[in-house]
Image (cartoon, rainbow, N blue to C red):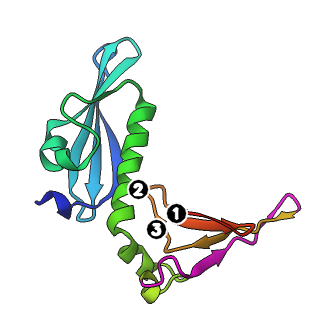
Amino acid sequence: MAASGHCFMEWNEQYVSKERGNRVVHYFLKDMSGESILAVVGTERSVRHMFYVVSDEFLNVHGGENSVHAGFRWRSRREVVNWLTSMLSKQHGQGGFAESAKDDPVSGVGAQQTYMRDYKGHLARNLKGHTSDIVWSGVAWSCGKQLKHYPAFCRNGITIV
């Protein structure tokens, strides 16, 4: 499959070995078709100290598109999770608006043409007695944690993009 054909929807963590002193963890990115690609391999260097590297399989398919390269490594699970989550965000940010726009009842089908000209929602929650005046703009998309994200918002007359 071509590199541009992948749009990652979620990531999974799989423990290959839980043996103390010899732990191995694999992190997979799953695309829209349900196929998983091994993205990161974590191995235990010493007791409770893991070492994470990007997989060769991932580099062969997506090496030129990302900030990671052969030999790229992380020292904590948190860094790996942040990177995996950013991969979901990047993919949705580039091509995910069309899929989320048709599923979002607020945006509607034709909302993609009015990307930044229209305000799509107004947050009208009461937060400890204060009414929020945030106006979300653009087309919303959902991340792997099923949270909605907007490309911009406006508050007190100031627009943040």
The quarter of the rendered structure image containing the N terminus is: bottom left
Residues under numbered marks 1 and 2 in contact, where contact means CB atoms less than 8 Å apart: yes
Q: Residue at x 48, y 55 (%)?
A: 145
User: x, y percentage for residue 139?
Assistant: 49, 74
Q: Determine the CA span between mark 3 and mark 1.
A: 5 Å
Query: Principal SS element in the magenta part?
Result: loop
| Magenta-colored span | 113-129
Residue 80: which quarter of the image? Answer: top left
Q: Is residue 111 magenta?
A: no
Label 2: how many Cα within 10 Å (few below 14, some 14–19, many 20+): many
Q: Residue at x 14, y 37 (%)?
A: 56
Residue receiving disc 2: 89
Residues under numbered marks 3 and 1 in contact, where contact means CB atoms less than 8 Å apart: yes
Label 3: how many Cα within 10 Å (few below 14, some 14–19, many 20+): many
Can residue 17 be seen? Answer: no
Sequence-wise first label, 1 or 2: 2
On screen, residue 63 above or below 49: below
Tell me the amino acid under the disc marked 2.
Answer: Ser
Sequence-wise first label, 3 or 2: 2
Q: Residue furthest bottom?
A: 110
Q: Residue at x 22, y 43 (%)?
A: 38
The quarter of the rendered structure image containing the C terminus is: bottom right
On screen, residue 20 above or below 83: above
Secondary structure at numbered mark 2: helix
Residue receiving disc 3: 141
Sequence-wise first label, 3 or 1: 3
Q: Determine the CA span between mark 1 and mark 2.
A: 9 Å
Label 1: how many Cα within 10 Å (few below 14, some 14–19, many 20+): some
Q: Residue at x 17, y 42 (%)?
A: 59
Residue receiving disc 1: 149
User: Residue 90 shows which numbered tag?
Assistant: none
